[in-house]
Amino acid sequence: MSSEVAINAGKIVTPFYSREKVSIKVRNGIIIDVSDGYVSSGNVLDYRDYIALPGLLDTHIHGIKGYDVNNGKIDDILGMSKTLVEYGVTGFLPSTVTASHEELVNICRCIKEAYEEWNLNPTPIGARILGLHLEGPYINPEKRGAQNPKFIRKPNIKEIKEYYHASNGLLKMITLAPEIEGCLEIISELTRLGITVSLGHSNASYDITVKAIVRGASRATHLFNAMKGIHHRDPGLIIALLEHPNVYVELIADLIHLHSSILRFVVRHVGSSRVILISDSISATGLSDGVYNLGGLKVHVKGGIARLSNGSLAGSTLTLNKALINMINLGFNLNDVVKMTSFNPARSLGIKGLGDIRPGFYGDFVIFDAEFKVKATVINGVEVYSSRRG
């Protein structure tokens, strides 16, 4: 039986245009029409006093409000799903930190089961589970950041295929360091499997990075962080990643991991179509300061900043709606920011139907007030969160 809903919005902002006083018709979860004027009869969600944006997509996130991907529990993944809609996130890519082979296999199975449970529900129960991101374990120990050195290792394609099959093909992205023995050689095979290769936690030279990009690497994991720095005679991987037009670059826009001038520089240099805003958030996000666990390492959160005992940053307590606000406050056009929070994350992973408001796309929206506070989150045309009812 067909279900249809109309969403009235005072304004919609997409990656490419803005329109005022609009109605969006969604049938069976898919947008079928975007029209001028409001709908007054039938099944209507009325947000005529608010702004509708494509739902935010967080494609690098480790946890939130006590939930942790590395716990390897279905309840943690579904708990993240149900929590993230409070922040306007309609889809997320659960991300691991480096762990043992057995733990990662278990997490892959957990993602598969959580994904299946999400899809079994007749109405959305929370943000979409987009797949799985393995951040490590094939990284450079010298640039490990908050990754547990005990489990860092060289790549093994047989091991990776076990992760791929355990997740039932939901393994969507792997962060690796191309200079580590064996990493460069497996990039082509990973891309053939449909796995996005992201470069990070790396000391790679410029030349090695270019070779990795030529073989199919197409993304940079939290650019600048846990990477070799730039030198005018030894540009390293950052310059190679910025130079290449086929590479998307992740930015943590919490104004802690990156100075505001760096955020402005990167967007102006590579353009808004290549930037992906991520949270890189950990389980402490949304909770009080204290001591938390990340992949077996103690993380001290003080003033909302997460650090290891040695002072290294350990993920963030950022949420993607706050990242959006930070970029607006830095002077960026909202259409461009929407590319960074919604459109580019989907494109970088080859996911269709997400990140825009147009016919054929899923009916996934975040509804903001004029101050960019989340008023509602809509998935498949269903209001899954409203600040009016919690």
Image (cartoon, helix red, strand yellow):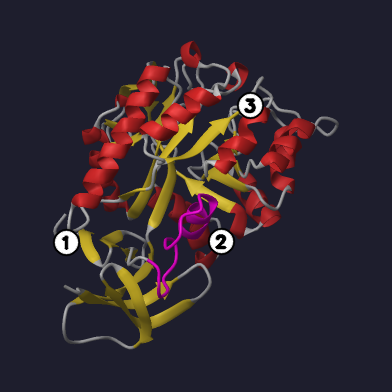
Instruction: Give the alpha-carbon distance from disc 2 to disc 3, as whole Å.
Output: 36 Å
Location of residue 291 (image quadrant): top left
- Per the rendered image, the range of residues in magenta is 342-361
Q: Helix, strand, or loop for circle 3? A: helix
Q: Depth check: give the residue in front, 111 or 340.
A: 111
Rendered location of residue 38, percent (x, y): 28, 86
**Mark 1 vs 3, N-terminal side:** 3
For the point 20% across and 87% down, which residue is it? Answer: 40
Residue 26: image x %, image y %? 29, 74
Closer to the camera, 28 or 16?
28
162 left or right, relative to 69: right
Residue extending furthest toward the left: 389
Asked whether disc 2 touches disc 3, contact meaning CB atoms under 8 Å apart, the reply is no
Figure check: 359 above or below 266: below
Residue designated by label 3: 183
Q: Amino acid at mark 2?
A: Phe
Residue 190: image x %, image y %?
57, 37
Q: Residue at x 67, y 51 (%)?
A: 246
Q: Name the residue at 48% across, 42% down.
A: 254
Q: Which residue is mark 1?
A: 388
